[in-house]
Image (cartoon, helix red, strand yellow):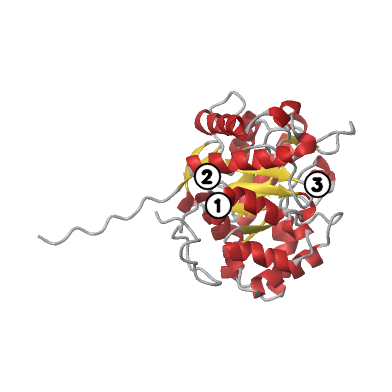
Amino acid sequence: MPPHPPLRPSPPTLRTVTGPLNATAVQGPVLAHEHLVLDLDRVGDGAAVLDADLHGAAVAAELAELHGTVGLGLVVELTCHGMGRAARALERIARRAKVPVMAATGWYYEPFHPADLRIRAVDELTAVLLDEIDHGLDGTEVRPGVLGEIGSHGEVPTGTESRALRAAARAAVARGLSVATHAQLGRGGLAQLDLLTGEGLAPHRISIGHQDLLDDPVVHRELAASGAYVAFDTVGKHRYQSDARRLRLLLALLEAGHADRALLSCDISRHGYLRVRGGQGYGHLFRSFLPALRAAGADDDLIDLLTRRNPLRFLTGAHVDLGRRVGRPARPGTDEDPI
C-alpha cells in the first residue's frame, strides 16, 4: 500500500468577539493596536473617550469603509481593565462593520489601576485573567484573544505594574496567548521584556508598544533581535511625534534586517481622532503612512509582511503559511512555535 501523506497541522485559530477565526482566512491588513470603545477621561472633559452609544456608529462606519477599500481583515482592540472596556459593544461594532475584532484583557498602567491592585498578589491577578480567558469578559461569553495593553510608565515598571505584567505573562503562557504592552512614550520596553520573559513567555509572543514615540533605534534593534515585536502603533498622532520621524525610525529598523518584527497601527484613543470629528481616523495608516513607506522603496510584499503576516504571527505564535516572507530567516529556538 502507498504510504499515507503526512498530516498537515491545523491552522491556528484567532479568538474574536464574534467567534473563532482561522488565521489563514485573514487576507487583508490587520490593525494591531486600536481602541473602538474606551474611557480614559480623568479630568472630566470627555475628550479621551470613545463612547459606545455616542461614537459606536462612527467607529463601525470607518471600519466598514476600510474593509471595502483596503480589505481590512482584523482589528486588535487593546482596551482592558481601567480603560472602559465593553465587550458587548465591541461585538456590536464588529457585526455592524463586518470586520473581525479581537478583544483583550489585562491592566493598563498604574494611574488607571483600581486601588486594590496594589495589594493583590501575582497569583491572584493571574487567576482573574485566566477566568476571563476561559469564561468571558464583563459578564459575557466574549473571550479575549490577547493580553494587552499591559502598561508601565518610566524606565522601570512600578511594583504594581510589575505584578500586572508578570500576571499577564503567566496567563499567556498557560493559555497560549500573546502579550501587547503599553510603554508610556516608548520608554521602559526593555524592562517590560525582561519581566515578561522572566515568567517564561517567549519573546515572539510579546509586542512592546509605542516604540515609534522613542527616538532610539538601538533599543528598537535590541528588542527585535531578542525576537520580540516592535510596535510602531501611534501612526498619525502628530501631537506626540511626526510621521516623518516615525518613518525614519521604521526604515532604520527595516534596514537593520528586522522587517519581520515590526507592527503598525494608529492607536485611536479619543473621539476627536475619528474622521467624522475631523481627525485622522483608523485609515490614516493606509491613506498616508504606507504611501510614504512605498515612496521610500517598500514593495507590496513588504507592506503585506508589516500589516498582515507579522501581526498574525504575533497573535498566534505560529509560523503560519501566509505567503512569501521577506527579511531575515526565522531564528532557530527563538521564533514561531511549530504547529
Q: Earlier in the sequence, mark 3 or mark 1?
A: 1
Q: What is the number of the mark on residue 273?
A: 3
Q: Please provide percent x and percent y for residue 290.
A: 69, 64
Disc 3, SS: helix
C-beta proximity under 8 Å, tags 1 and 2: yes
Disc 2, SS: loop
Q: Please provide percent x and percent y for residue 140.
A: 57, 25
Disc 1, SS: helix
Marks 3/1: CA–CA distance: 29 Å
Q: Amino acid at mark 2?
A: Leu
Classify residue 110 by image quadrant.
top right
Q: Nearer the viewer, mark 3 or mark 1?
A: 1
Q: Which residue is mark 2?
A: 177
Q: Earlier in the sequence, mark 1 or mark 2?
A: 2
Q: Please provide percent x and percent y for residue 11.
A: 41, 51
Q: What is the number of the mark on residue 30?
A: none
Q: Give me the residue at 56% from left, 72% from top.
A: 327
Q: Earlier in the sequence, mark 2 or mark 3?
A: 2
Of residue 52 and residue 336, the one placed in the foreground of this image is: 336
Q: Which residue is mark 1?
A: 205
C-beta proximity under 8 Å, tags 2 and 3: no
Classify residue 337 by image quadrant.
bottom left
Marks 2/3: CA–CA distance: 30 Å
